[in-house]
Image (cartoon, rainbow, N blue to C red):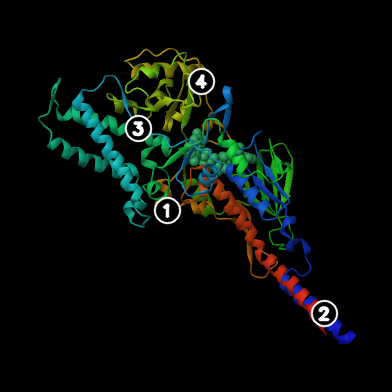
């Protein structure tokens, strides 16, 4: 091969390689590790996105977090004896996902707690034994209904798409009640014949207990807002698992996302505005500017946004240009609510005198005057106590003695988050005295809590599937659709500058820690996918170069 032929070979190889990369000499675009990426929020989703980007070779990432800590809605606080209290997510629902697998592999899980009956305590008066029988019947019937909802498959059947849990369930419950009443007119107890009106009251009492419990678990503030798709679409326990008391959920998530450089994290940086610019200049690698409330700003190629849905709902001016109408409607329709978990410390463990002894939790049932207190109509301070639904001893009682957790749902959660600790402690004491008549309840000493609904960076606790979303045939995956499209240098290939992660965007695990983690990984993968062809073709061009060298040497 003479010198002219060698020259020709090299020219051809250069042209082919340039064609293969598709970047026509724009070196930066072919090396995504140089791309400036901004993640907003350092909760589970933000941390998982950062870790996935790092694992994929990205090296220019900044995480802007409003608070002075990471973890977001995972918040574990150390107590004496190196035990932890969890103020945010603590239960691992289901198996077969990254969080369960990690906890299981590292032996972090408590042995599965024994499944105990949930004993009830009653306000006003203790029901007779026959009344209790009806309460148990109604309770197991409602449990069965939820079980049936969970087993329904996702379907376009309008019965599932458009109907709230409440409207369907109340109709079912009435039918069941009619059947029970027709078969039990002559039962007697110490009050004489158990008449239909008294039976109805027991059913109502259980029904309202169920609604209040659902307001904690889902956490819809109004049962009429909850879609049946909440149960058909969401994969949640049982089985449920908790961590050992000496293991903090926040350190589990930290450990799962531990190798990206901590210098990426910028704390105390509340983001105020996200602007897109140069949208049509495909070759420009910085297309978005993120402005923080302290006046600092940062430009990047892509933003992965992990704000809680409650914050998104209240941030119409965050984006310039505005999000698409489709996205804004999806945000407006999706359900976001609040529940409160209080830790209350007493001088003695009064609950040890309650029957049955050793119970891990108690359900609180109001047997009279239910309708006058629900739905919530006034902002009187004692109203929140109607939404106290369960309490139970803190498991690691040796390290955190004489302490119970108390759960409050629905409107009661928003209200209690606004009250002072002194007022909450006092009213908590009053309500517990009403339910625990068989023992003396001492005055509580300390309240430990996190006010999620009162915090501008959360606005509540987690997402539920709303009837508005199901009526519009939407699902959490609509919240995940990226925005601010642009055409890449590779002809015909689209990419997006604004990506959305966070628990609310996961179709099956919304409202959970693992849903948040998976959503962060998903968006990091999506981002990487915008550049995967460049990378593949860069590999191809390298292969061509190699081939040309070999051919040159041969000839
Ligand atoms: C009380 C409670 C109990 C729960 N129980 C469970 C449970 O038992 N099991 C379970 O699986 N899940 C549970 N969850 C839900 C679970 O904790 C969440 O789904 C998950 O942690 C959400 O992670 P995320 O990354 O999507 O959002 P977040 O953790 O909320 O992260 C978003 C981050 O964005 C930050 N941010 C907000 N605004 C701005 C801004 N303007 N600029 C910059 N940063 C901002 C926030 O500070 C936050 O750090 C619970 C949650 C709560 C609150």
Q: Nearer the viewer, mark 3 or mark 1?
A: 3
Question: Which marked residue is nearer to the observer: mark 1 or mark 4?
Answer: 4
Distance, label 1 to label 4, CA atoms, is 42 Å
**Residue with the mark numbered 3:** 116
Earlier in the chain: of badge 3 and badge 2, it is 2
Are circles 1 and 2 on residues that touch, CB within 8 Å?
Answer: no
Mark 4 crowdedness (10 Å alpha carbons): few <14, some 14-19, many ≥20: some
Residue at screen point 34% across, 50% down: 151
Measure the alpha-carbon separation of dots 3 and 2. Answer: 77 Å
The residue that label 1 is drawn on is 472
Q: Position of residue 168 (x, y in %)?
A: 29, 45
Circles 2 and 4 in contact, beta carbons < 8 Å: no
Does label 2 or label 4 sit earlier along the sequence?
2
At x 51%, y 54%, the residue is 326
Residue beneath label 2, please?
Answer: 11
Residue lying at 58% horizontally and 28% vertically, measured from the top left? 77
Dot 4: element: strand
């Amino acid at each position: 091969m003479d010198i002219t032929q060698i020259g020709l070979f090299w020219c051809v190889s250069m042209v082919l390689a340039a064609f293969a990369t598709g970047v026509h000499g724009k070196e930066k675009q072919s090396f995504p590790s140089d791309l400036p990426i901004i993640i907003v929020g350092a909760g589970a989703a933000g941390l998982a996105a950062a870790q996935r980007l790092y694992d994929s070779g990205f090296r220019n990432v900044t995480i802007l977090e409003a608070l002075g800590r990471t973890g977001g809605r995972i918040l574990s606080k150390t107590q004496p004896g190196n035990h932890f209290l969890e103020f945010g997510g603590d239960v691992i629902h289901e198996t077969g996902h990254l969080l369960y697998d990690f906890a299981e592999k590292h032996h972090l899980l408590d042995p599965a707690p024994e499944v105990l009956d949930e004993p009830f305590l009653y306000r006003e008066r203790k029901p007779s034994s026959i009344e209790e029988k009806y309460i148990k019947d109604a309770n197991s019937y409602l449990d069965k209904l939820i079980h049936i909802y969970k087993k329904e498959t996702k379907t376009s059947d309008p019965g599932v798409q458009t109907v709230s849990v409440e409207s369907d369930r109340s109709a079912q419950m009435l039918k069941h009640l009619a059947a029970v009443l027709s078969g039990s007119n002559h039962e007697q107890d110490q009050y004489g014949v158990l008449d239909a009106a008294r039976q109805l009251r027991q059913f109502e009492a259980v029904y309202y207990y169920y609604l209040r419990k659902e307001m904690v678990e889902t956490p819809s503030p109004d049962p009429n807002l909850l879609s049946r798709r909440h149960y058909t679409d969401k994969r949640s326990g049982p089985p449920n698992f908790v961590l050992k008391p000496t293991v903090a959920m926040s350190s589990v998530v930290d450990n799962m996302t531990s190798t990206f450089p901590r210098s990426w994290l910028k704390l105390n940086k509340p983001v105020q505005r996200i602007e897109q610019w140069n949208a049509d200049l495909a070759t420009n690698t910085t297309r978005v500017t993120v402005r923080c409330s302290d006046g600092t700003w940062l430009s990047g190629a892509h933003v992965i946004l992990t704000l809680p849905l409650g914050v998104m709902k209240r941030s119409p001016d965050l984006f310039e240009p505005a999000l698409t109408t489709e996205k804004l409607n999806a945000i407006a329709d999706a359900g976001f609510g609040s529940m409160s978990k209080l830790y209350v410390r007493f001088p003695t463990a009064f609950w040890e005198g309650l029957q049955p002894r050793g119970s891990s939790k108690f359900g609180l049932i109001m047997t009279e005057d239910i309708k006058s207190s629900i739905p919530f109509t006034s902002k009187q301070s004692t109203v929140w106590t109607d939404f106290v639904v369960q309490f139970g001893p803190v498991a690691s009682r040796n390290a955190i003695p004489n302490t119970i957790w108390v759960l409050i749902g629905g409107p009661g959660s928003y209200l209690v988050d606004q009250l002072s600790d002194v007022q909450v402690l006092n009213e908590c004491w009053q309500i517990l005295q009403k339910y625990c008549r068989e023992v003396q309840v001492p005055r509580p000493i300390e309240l430990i809590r996190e006010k999620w609904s009162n915090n501008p960076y959360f606005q509540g606790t987690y997402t539920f599937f709303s009837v508005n979303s199901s009526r519009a045939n939407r699902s959490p995956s609509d919240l995940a659709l990226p925005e601010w499209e642009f055409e890449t240098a590779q002809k015909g290939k689209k990419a997006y500058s604004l990506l959305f992660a966070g628990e609310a965007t996961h179709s099956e695990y919304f409202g959970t820690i693992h849903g948040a983690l998976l959503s962060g990984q998903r968006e990091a993968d999506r981002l990487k996918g915008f550049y995967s062809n460049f990378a593949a073709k860069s590999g191809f061009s390298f292969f061509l170069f190699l081939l040309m060298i070999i051919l040159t040497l041969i000839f």
